[in-house]
Amino acid sequence: MTKTILFGIIVATVMILGVFAASQNQAVSQEMEEESELAQELGKHLVDTETISLTGRLQPGDFKLLMDITGYTSESGHVAMKVPCGSEGEQLLAIVAGVAPDVAPIDMDYVAPLSNPPSSCVYHGEIPEGITDIALINISDVTVPFYTMSSAGYSVTITIHGEANGEHM
């Protein structure tokens, strides 16, 4: 009789441990599946901030490619630039964006408190939804140099949030 009770206790313990182990495996499996889904969702998004130092010079009509996020398209973004400008703060350079070769200028606002025409001016604007390419283009009729004794340096900073589009242009 003692052997039968002992055997019953052992069988019950094994069964309880088996149920516990199975539920733990199911919980671990569910957690791994949730982490995998999160990783897949995060892989569909791009958030990037780049500061591009400008050096040399840019001829009239010439451009400098600043960002290409092909494979993603923008959902939102912001661009700010500190660049040479005209004596009244007028833009000599513009930011263009789109899906190459179809690009258009972005509306840029002049930031007077941070500007010192013609040495340097600060402009900023919003990046539209649905773009993959961003460039800086010389819209003036003069060569724009990116070096001067009176400037701490010229740059463009872009922050962009994009979503995977599954295409490659």
Image (cartoon, rainbow, N blue to C red):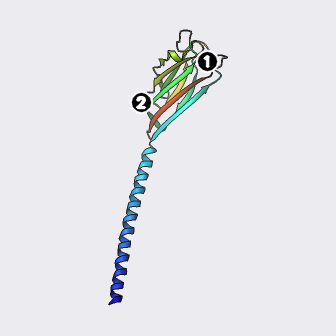
Distance from disc 2 to disc 1, alpha carbons, whole Å, reads 29 Å
Q: Nearer the viewer, residue 26 or 137?
A: 26
**As drawn, which residue projects farthest toward the front?**
2
In terms of secondary structure, where does tag 1 sit? loop
Mark 1 closeness class: few <14, some 14–19, many ≥20 residues within 10 Å: some
**Residue 35 image offset from top left, x and y in percent:** 43, 52
Which is closer to the viewer, label 2 or label 1? 2
Residue type at numbered disc 2: Glu
Q: Nearer the viewer, residue 11 or 51?
A: 11
Q: Is residue 139 above or below residue 72?
A: above
Residue at 58% x, 20% y: name it.
62
**Residue 133 image offset from top left, x and y in percent:** 50, 30
Q: Quadrant of the N terminus?
A: bottom left
Residue type at numbered disc 1: Gln
Mark 2 closeness class: few <14, some 14–19, many ≥20 residues within 10 Å: some
Q: Nearer the viewer, residue 13 or 157?
A: 13
Residue at 56% x, 9% y: name it.
87
Residue pointed to by mark 1: 59
124 left or right, relative to 116: left
Q: Which mark is residue 46?
A: none
| Residue 115 figure quarter | top right
**Residue 105 image offset from top left, x and y in percent:** 47, 21
Q: Which mark is residue 129?
A: 2
